[in-house]
Amino acid sequence: EAGDHESFMHKEMLEQPAAAARALSGRLDERFGTAHLGGLNMDARETRAIRRVKILGCGSAYYVGQMGAALVEELARIPADAEAASEFRYRDPVIEADTLYVAVSQSGETIDTLLAVQEIRRKGGRVVGLVNVVGSAIARECDGGIYLHAGPEVAVASTKALTNMFLGFALLALQLGRVRDLSIADGRRLINGLTRIPAQIQEILDDEAAIAAVAEQLSEAESVFFVGRVRGFPVAREGAQKFKEISYRHAEAYQTSELKHGPLALISPAVPTVAIVPDDELTDRNVGALHEIAARRGPLVVITHEGVDLGEVDCVRIDVPRNERELDPVLLVVPLQLLAFHAAQRLGHDIDKPRNLAKSVTVE
Ligand code: BG6
């Protein structure tokens, strides 16, 4: 039962602060500035021997996998990337003994992800799972794992599980980093950032009414662009995914830097853009792109941090709280959940069970 909430998605979005706290509980080690993930079943020597990280998932789990790959590269300096599990198996992948494979799945039952895990293990690769449902098929097939502790997620559009997947990756990257060159000071800096996240998610949720008003405007558009760069790009992909899944409006994610190589041709007063512009190394370039969009009279919604100077650009601005830059994606994504939810609600759709979609796809 969704209880007092009009939908499970709404209930699950609001559960995120508590769910995030559970994902971190008992796993942070202040003293050594690291994470404890006993379920990985790997000692320090094995952890150090990892030369590459390959992340596999479907849908939102794939996009959060891209966020996770960035965390692993930034914190542990291990080459990492994410791939759609549904494609991986069909290109006869090269499986390496010194690669750590990570399977990401809320349900633990998604067939494409499960078959990818089986293919890797058949070839002798090591797979760990980032899984929510305890004892699920993927959890059972893996060599070890990190349970997400998000609690049951019913709505097709993933919210609290996705948040906890990101935190799972942050813990994994911290542990991988601390057996390598990540300093104890940096480890503690990230632990401090992680512990602030539950309350910061709550702050964004408290802004729901303002974000709902923006969503009403977006729900009128036939097509919406979601753009971001580097850490912001998988956030944009997840934002577009949520928006199309439940509002049934066309939504497309692009790297902000690629706009001028094609999609700028589509920008007009009828095509709004949701831009992810965190306070980071790329802020100035991102702001430049906002001006390009505004010059074509494209309506703009900008997800940013307080104090970021967007120039004179005409836009609706949504500020999220600041954290450590590496952890920004988990906060930037929350307003995008609310935008999709309120657009879909405005349009009168079945939010928990969007047409043509299933919560977990167990046949190929
Ligand atoms: C899709 C769902 O079919 O499966 C997505 O519609 C979900 O919302 C994806 O992200 C992966 O599911 P899971 O359970 O493997 O995380």
Image (cartoon, helix red, strand yellow):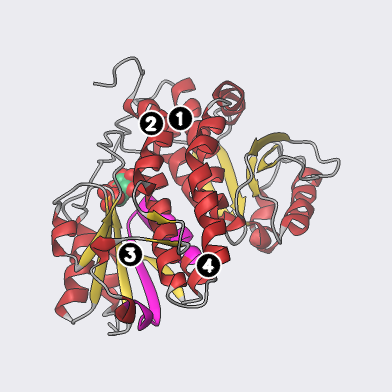
Q: In the picture shown, does residue 197 fall above or below 91?
A: above
Q: Which of the two residues, 246 or 262, is positioned nearer the viewer here?
A: 246
Q: Position of residue 54 (x, y in %)?
A: 36, 72
Q: Position of residue 221 (x, y in %)?
A: 58, 33
**Magenta span contains residue 49:** yes
Are circles 3 and 1 on residues that touch, CB within 8 Å?
no
Circle 1: residue type = Phe
Of the image marks 4 and 1, the number of the one nearer the N terminus = 4
Task: Specify whether 328 is left or right of 317.
Answer: left
Secondary structure at badge 4 equals helix
Secondary structure at badge 1 equals helix
Circle 3: residue type = Leu
Badge 2: residue crowd in 10 Å (few <14, some 14–19, many ≥20): some
For the point 19% across and 69% down, which residue is it? 143
Secondary structure at badge 2 equals loop
Of the image marks 3 and 1, the number of the one nearer the N terminus = 3
For the point 55% across and 35% down, which residue is it? 222
The CA span between labels 3 and 1 is 26 Å
Task: Give the residue pinned by disc 2.
Answer: 15
The CA span between labels 2 and 3 is 26 Å
Circle 4: residue type = Ile
Task: Give the residue pinned by disc 4.
Answer: 184
Q: Is mark 2 within 8 Å of ligand 1?
A: no
Of the image marks 2 and 4, the number of the one nearer the N terminus = 2
Q: Which of the two residues, 33 or 3, is positioned nearer the viewer here?
A: 33
Numbered mark located on residue 56 in the image: 3
Task: Give the residue pinned by disc 1.
Answer: 341
Badge 3: residue crowd in 10 Å (few <14, some 14–19, many ≥20): many
Of the image marks 3 and 4, the number of the one nearer the N terminus = 3
Badge 4: residue crowd in 10 Å (few <14, some 14–19, many ≥20): some
